[in-house]
């Protein structure tokens, strides 16, 4: 594709990340959404996650922006169809796992991203918790 998102509004960049990459599995737009320095790291995280949960859906619960900073609260659902964190596929579904991410968007590209996910809830719903 080559180039930053045409609408450089930081919230729209994050919306496109969720819609195109997470919900449609369109990895080809990662280079357009992330800075060249951060795109390889995004691939290393997103590709295995989407391979583990092939029907993943992220719902935007709340999206707030101030300047270059966007904070998103998301609800993530999907079916465990591939190895995740060393656990083979269970075929079980998780629903509405809470996630919060912070993004810094400069010139239409994500230059920093970090977040928190309720991994314990996902593990519990998939039946992967230890007894």
Image: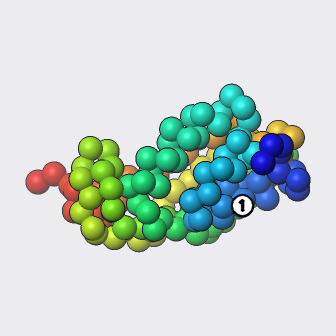
Give me the residue at 65% from left, 33% from top: 38
- The residue that disc 1 covers is 15
Question: Which quadrant of the figure has residue 63?
Answer: bottom right
Taking the image as shown, residue 90 lies to the left or right of residue 12, namely left
Q: x, y percentage for residue 99?
A: 51, 56
In this picture, is 124 found above or below 84? Answer: below
Q: Is residue 121 shown to the viewer in this render?
A: no
| Residue at the far left in the pictured view | 131
Q: Residues within 10 Å of mark 1 (few under 14, many from 20)?
A: some
Question: Which quadrant of the figure has residue 79?
Answer: bottom left
Give me the residue at 56% from left, 41% from top: 43
Give me the residue at 65% from left, 37% from top: 39
| Quarter occupied by the C terminus | bottom left
Q: Is residue 21 shown to the viewer in this render?
A: yes
Q: 18 or 114, which is in the foreground?
A: 18
Give me the residue at 28% from left, 69% from top: 92
Q: 119 or 21, which is in the foreground?
A: 21
Q: x, y percentage for residue 116?
A: 50, 47
**SS category of the residue bearing label 1:** helix
Q: x, y percentage for residue 85?
A: 31, 45
Count of marks placed on residues: 1
């Amino acid at each position: 594709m080559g180039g930053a998102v045409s609408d450089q509004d930081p919230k729209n960049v994050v919306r496109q990340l969720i819609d195109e990459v997470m919900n449609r599995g369109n990895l080809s737009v990662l280079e357009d959404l992330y800075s060249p320095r951060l795109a390889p790291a995004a691939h290393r995280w997103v590709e295995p996650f989407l391979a583990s949960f092939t029907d993943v859906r992220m719902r935007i619960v709340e999206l707030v922006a101030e300047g270059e900073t966007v904070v998103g609260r998301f609800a993530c659902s999907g079916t465990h169809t591939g190895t995740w964190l060393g656990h083979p596929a269970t075929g079980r579904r998780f629903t509405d796992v809470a996630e919060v991410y912070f993004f810094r968007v400069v010139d239409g590209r994500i230059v920093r991203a970090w977040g928190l996910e309720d991994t314990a809830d996902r593990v519990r719903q998939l039946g992967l918790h230890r007894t």
